[in-house]
Image (tube, rainbow, N blue to C red):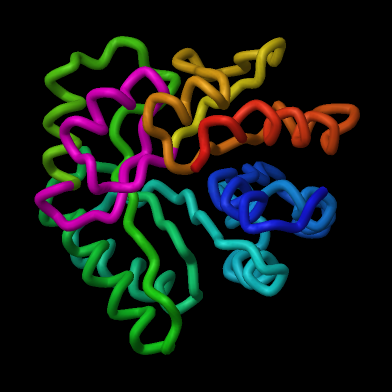
Amino acid sequence: MVNSESEENIRKRLALALDLDDLVAATRMGKRLKPWFGVAKVGLELFAAAGPEAISAFTDMGYEVFLDLKLHDIPTTVRKASQVIGSLGVSYLTVHTSGGVEMLSSAVEGLKAGAEAADVKPGKVLGVTILTSDVSAPREEFELRVGRAVEAGCGGLVCAVTDLVDASFLAPHLVKMVPGIRPLGSAADDQARIGTPSSAIEQGADVLVIGRAVTAASEPELVSTAIHAEITPFIR
């Protein structure tokens, strides 16, 4: 691949979802696909298997880390957990917007305090709105949850492709992290509200979260290259 500013901009828009229970396998995949992805998603499965080491493994590799734990607890607990996480140098941390404004605000405060104490760059709290597997949530609920994220000072949202137009209208300044990305011909798996890479970027996605469509492919490099080619015309 050409090592250019344009390619770097594209890499920053792609998050590799490493939904594995083995850190060795995850880091091997991360190294293999580093030329195409700039963000590594560490979810519940990998964090449960390896803990904070899963974060340092990818930050040391040069990735921004998207820690997808979807925190949801009382504000004090969320603040304390977020403070620990902030000290680890994550770029993104997910928290459920259904937990309310106070809980979200606590996550924002904790993540910032942890980063400052460790003298690392502060990450962004991403408010999880409606899961991509949920097809029954009313539109009013989505709007309510986005409003909570804005009020709490979150840095971004996690939303489906189908919610991007509304999210961009309601919170234009927040980062839009979008899971459920499936290149044409890929299986939907357990996600009901999905979209192609180009459709997501065109509708306002900032970062695309891509997992099994790449990691389970027989030739992940070829799939990754095709994704880059698909979204390049839509990225300035």
Image spot of residue 20 (x, y percent): 71, 45
Residue drawn 66% across and 35% down? 211
Residue drawn 41% across and 23% down? 161
Q: Nearer the viewer, residue 230 or 99?
A: 230
Q: Is residue 178 visible?
A: yes
Q: Is residue 42 visible?
A: no
Residue drawn 48% across and 66% down? 90
The answer to whether residue 77 is above or below residue 73 is below
The answer to whether residue 145 is above or below residue 40 is above
Image spot of residue 55 (x, y percent): 60, 66
- With 150 as the anchor, is 34 left or right in this view? right
The answer to whether residue 114 is above or below residue 104 is below
Q: Quadrant of residue 64?
A: bottom right
Q: Nearer the viewer, residue 5 or 171?
A: 5
Q: How many marks?
A: 0
The answer to whether residue 111 is above or below residue 186 is below
Q: Residue furthest right?
A: 218
- Give the residues in magenta: 150-177
Q: Quadrant of residue 4?
A: bottom right
- With 36 as the anchor, is 178 left or right in this view? left
Q: Nearer the viewer, residue 165 or 103?
A: 165
Instruction: Tell me, yes or no, whether the highlighted magenta stretch contains residue 197.
Output: no
Residue drawn 78% across and 48% down? 33
Image spot of residue 228 (x, y percent): 68, 35
- With 80 as the anchor, is 231 left or right in this view? right
Image spot of residue 151 (x, y percent): 10, 50
